[in-house]
Amino acid sequence: MAEAAHTPCVFSGIQPSGNLHLGNYLGALKRFVETQDRGIQSIYCVVDLHAVTVWQDPAALAHATRELTAGFIASGLDPERSILFNQSQVAEHAQMAWVFNCVARMGWMKRMTQFKDKAGKNAEQASLGLFAYPALMAADILVYHATHVPVGEDQKQHLELTQEIARKFNHDYGVEFFPVTEPVIEGAATRVMSLRDGTKKMSKSDPSDMSRINLTDDADTIARKIRKAKTDPEPLPETVKGLEARPEARNLVNIYAALAGESVEAVLADLGGRPFSEFKPALADLAVEHLAPISAEMARLMQDAAEIDRILARGAERARAIAAPILRETYRIMGMVGA
Ligand code: AMP
Ligand code: TRP
């Protein structure tokens, strides 16, 4: 089916659930800033409505929403050039989600692996919102006619569902209204692994704080975590092939390359043959050099919650200006009187 041409527009969302870490920075925030800097229309959303699909303490949710916003800005996101807001302030997301609840099929939703993982054995006790989560995600994206969505590998299935929803709506109503959005899945270098186990993703839910570098860690903490990071006894290899079957070494080299903005080959050409006792301090210096200004800026921004709230309100207003006409047109296509 020929798709109508849509202007490039990037949308992505992150849940405000606390503990922003190096994986979020390299895998999401830093990439979002690069997109903005290429001059593509970019919309970034703190998805608080998604967060409440599992219970959230209200004060913690508000804090995490502001902290994530501060993290975006401290990482270089310019709330004037990009649009930065929290989902619940733009009612069109929830309204479009209802439409998509009626487009998506039960069978599609039942196949979602994230639901199965999150609901666990006790699916009967999961919220209806957790089951409908991917329809809200499709609404986030399609209510802006976004064409590209940078996400992690784990979100691929949800993006495929978003495409299915767009196709089915277009087909059922005989229109070419919604774009079939393309996922932009991160490369291997942006999959940051745990500092304690190179085969596990760095994650906010890992019980060990030593497994991750938080964006709120101070310089000493960052250096200590890198010093204690798990490694093997061999020196760094000279070639990328030499990192195979050495997950911890590969992870630290990937982190170094991503922070330095160099290729893994270039890092190994420079540092291959060095023992970890030399490599780790170099990595710690690099990490502190990059992350300390971000964490300092986050702390500074967090002291003025009112200013963060103003930024989110202004972002929401700009988001609504795009979303409202698209929702209205969706309603009109469906035959809703008054749209
Ligand atoms: P999450 O905190 O898992 O909801 O993820 C928020 C964003 O950060 C998503 O775009 C993820 O793909 C990204 N992300 C989370 N953990 C990592 C990681 N260990 N490496 C790279 N990207 C990550
Ligand atoms: N489900 C995504 C995650 O857990 C977050 C998200 C919600 C999202 N809506 C989105 C990501 C829209 C991209 C586009 O990471």
Image: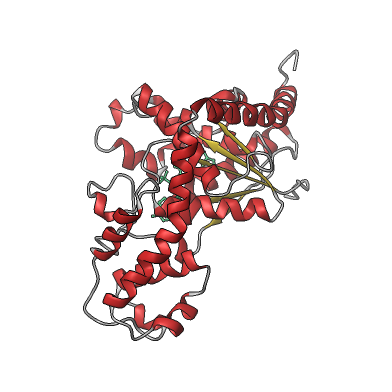
Q: Please give left or right for residue 213 compared with residue 104 in the image.
A: left
**Percent of width and height locating residue 250:** 36, 72
Q: Quadrant of residue 15?
A: top left
Outermost residue, top direction? 338
Q: Which residue is drawn at 60% across and 39% down?
A: 141
User: Is any atom of residue 52 visible in this view?
Assistant: no
Q: Please give left or right for residue 39 compared with residue 126 in the image.
A: right
When the figure is inspected, residue 190 is found, relative to residue 119, above or below; the finding is below
**Percent of width and height locating residue 273:** 34, 86
When the figure is inspected, residue 203 is found, relative to residue 135, above or below; the finding is below
Q: Nearer the viewer, residue 314 or 43?
A: 314
Outermost residue, right direction? 5
Q: Please give left or right for residue 193 compared with residue 277 in the image.
A: right
Q: Residue at x 38, y 43 (%)?
A: 114
Q: Residue at x 37, y 23 (%)?
A: 59
When the figure is inspected, residue 121 is found, relative to residue 195, above or below; the finding is above
Q: In which quarter of the image is residue 82?
A: top right
Q: Tally the marks.
A: 0
**Percent of width and height locating residue 241:** 39, 82
Q: Residue at x 63, y 44 (%)?
A: 78
Q: Which of 293 and 338 is in front in this view?
A: 293
Q: Nearer the viewer, residue 114 or 311?
A: 311
User: Is any atom of residue 10 visible in this view?
Assistant: yes
**In the picture, which quadrant includes the C terminus?**
top right
**Percent of width and height locating residue 87:** 54, 29
